[in-house]
Amino acid sequence: MTNRADPIHDLPRDMARLLEIMRRLRDPDTGCPWDLEQDFASIAPYTIEEAYEVADAIDRADFDDLKGELGDLLFQAVYHGQIAAEAGHFTFDDIVNTVADKMIARHPHVFGDATRDKTAAQQTRDWEAHKARERQSRAGPGGVLDGVALSLPALLRAVKLQNRAARVGFDWPETAQVLDKLVEEAGELVAARDTLTAAAVADEMGDLLFVMANLARHLGVDPEAALRGTNAKFTRRFGFVEAALQKAGRRCEDATLDEMDALWNAAKALE
């Protein structure tokens, strides 16, 4: 039963209320046992999951769901902020002020004297250059690829690594050259399948996927978003196959590949 006498219900419905809820959840004497056991590492997977759920709601254009998912993602920042405050590292206010200062510094054309007369591509290059200066000021001179997070999804990290290398001229100038490399890597994978170890085949598969990410970059396609779209399309069409078979009193296990393929093509035709 909800305790309406608890003053938490009477707080203003704003950020301060959420921060107080988080503080209460982590209270050593009266907080939630599960929440008290968590640390940065144990919460990090939930943070990543919530970010993907935000992306999923956007893909589905479900704005009611997006509201909730953005709240869940915000709560992750609050959670990390509370853990950091307890350890004496920083507070949630520090998080807010740091990102506010960063946005002001990275937008001199809005908050400073720099000209706004630039294309979006030029502003993106300025943004990346500013980020590079920030990294250098924090850690000193380092490699071009330093600072690309290891925990990023592999396709996304591949694109970021390639973008970093491209900024210093390590890139194919033409998309046709990427396509040639794609054909080359695919051929090496086919050869590896019959002659090399499983580890070598996996290595060749990685090379092929890396070139695919590079091709997406050259075509201006987000490979993560493209693959999410294809996953959704596959799920939708396979669902049609299952539903058609169920209507006929059958299961996928009972159908031939040709029958399922015909239903798949029917699903494509309907789309």
Image (cartoon, rainbow, N blue to C red):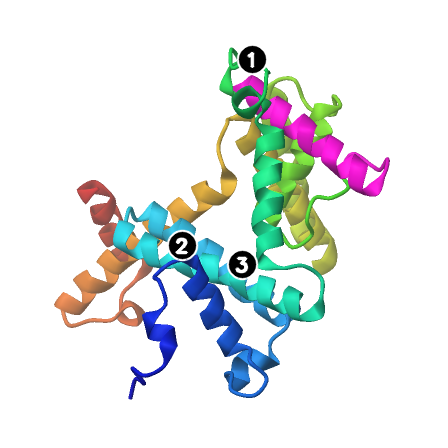
Label 3 sits on a secondary structure element that is helix
Could you say which quadrant of the image residue 101 lies in? top right
Q: Is residue 2 above or below residue 178?
A: below
- Say which of 205 and 144 sits in front: 144
Horizontal side, residue 149 vs residue 76: left or right: right
Residue 174 image offset from top left, x and y in percent? 61, 18
Q: Give the residue type that dot 1 points to.
A: Thr
Residue occupying the point 36% across, 81% down:
6
Residue 154 image offset from top left, x and y in percent? 61, 49
Q: Give the residue type that dot 2 points to.
A: Leu
Q: N-terminal of the two: label 3 or label 2? A: 2
Q: Provide the residue span drawn in magenta.
A: 121-144
Any magenta on residue 132? yes
Mark 1 lies on residue: 115
Query: How many numbered markers are drawn?
Result: 3
Q: Is residue 258 above or below residue 39?
A: above
Find the distance from the CA under tag 2 to the CA under tag 1: 33 Å
Query: Image quadrant for the C terminus?
Result: top left
Mark 3 lies on residue: 77
Q: Is residue 69 above or below residue 188?
A: below
Label 1 sits on a secondary structure element that is loop
Any magenta on residue 133? yes
Label 2 sits on a secondary structure element that is helix
Instruction: Please say whether residue 143 is visible from this viewpoint.
Output: yes
Residue 58 image offset from top left, x and y in percent? 35, 47
Mark 2 lies on residue: 70
Residue occupying the point 18% across, 43% down:
270
Horizontal side, residue 214 vs residue 58: left or right: right
